[in-house]
Amino acid sequence: MSATAVKPDAPRGQRSVPDSVPAIVTAVALLALWEGAVKVLEIPAFILPTPSSVAIRIVDDLATGVILPHLWTTFIEVAVGFVLAALLGVALGTMVALVRALEKTIYPIVLALQTVPKVAIAPLLIIWFGYGIHSKAVTAGLIAFFPIMVNVIVGLKTVDHRRVLLMQALRAGPVKTYLKVRLPSMLPYLFAGLEVGIIFSVIGAIVGEFVGSSVGLGTLIIQRQATVDVAGVFSVLAYLSIMGLVLSLIIKAFAHRLTFWARSQEIVSP
């Protein structure tokens, strides 16, 4: 027999280790191993630079301002694409989940289109939307759209049917039922999709920049790769990772604040 119980507080004077500490320690250990391996094996810098030289390049890119216009452009592409994906994913996911006819007609088409590699259609998006940020934002949105839509559909289909019946008994309309019952139950799934979608948006923006662009972090990677500036490439990759991490943490912060009631309690079994 199991029971739900609240985890007891830690003994007074005993502090719990933050969740981020193991990841930080592991990252530092891997960087130290990387640094030592490059020096011991005498690997040329044009093949694999040391983390210390990459760190110097990261600081230099920021100090000289070289990275800033590219970082800003990529950020705009990611943000616009993510917002488009979120709006379309929530709207279409809601319609597919609540309208049976659309689930049978539209959803299979969306699944079929999702199997097409976005790298393959990126050149078409360049033709249709031009070399500006629009084509990159659309590419980012297309890649981020599917996980958001799927999570919305799953979230709406897992709503407790008894709550819906209660709202119907109270003569609540479809809109009120959606806002009071379906939407709150769907939010945890939505934010899970958004966390994946924001990372996919970064990938989509870079894919679009690889295909054709004059500014952006993807373009800067290609330029530095052409000059065998490996440390510079690692510097851009570091800024991309930081962007993705910060955006993901922002989504997590909103999820933590808006779905506090959905955080599961620890199950304690005797």
Image (cartoon, helix red, strand yellow):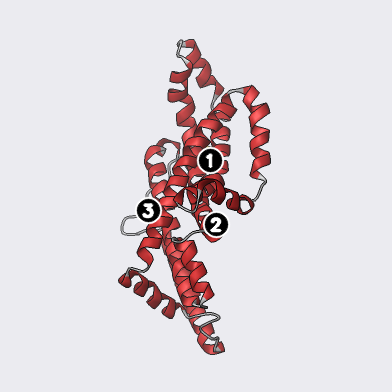
Is any part of residue 22 visible from this angle? no
Residue 93 spot, x, y in % from top left: 55, 32
Viewer-nearest of labels 1 and 3?
1
Residue neighbourhood size for the residue with mark 2, other residues' Cα within 10 Å, grouped as few (<14), some (14–19), many (≥20): some
Q: Residues within 10 Å of mark 3 (few under 14, many from 20)?
A: few
Quick one: label 1, few (<14), some, or many (20+) residues within 10 Å?
Answer: many
- 182 lies above or below 81: above
Residue 107 percent coordinates (x, y): 64, 33
Q: Secondary structure at mark 3?
A: loop
For residue 257, what is the image quadrant? Answer: top left
In this rendering, which labeled residue sits more in front, label 1 or label 2?
A: 2
Q: Secondary structure beneath disc 2?
A: helix
At x 50% / y 34%, what residue is drawn?
Answer: 90
Screen quadrant of the C terminus: top right
Sequence-first tag of 1 and 3? 3
Q: CA distance from mark 1 to mark 2?
A: 19 Å
Depth order, front residue of 186/245: 245
Decide if residue 79 is on the left or right side of residue 230.
left
Q: Which mark is residue 148?
A: 1
Residue placed under numbered mark 2 in the picture = 207
Name the kind of residue labelled 1 in the image: Ile
Question: Percent position (x, y) of residue 145?
Answer: 54, 42
Residue positioned 40% across, 76% down in the render = 57
Mark 2 belongs to which amino acid?
Val
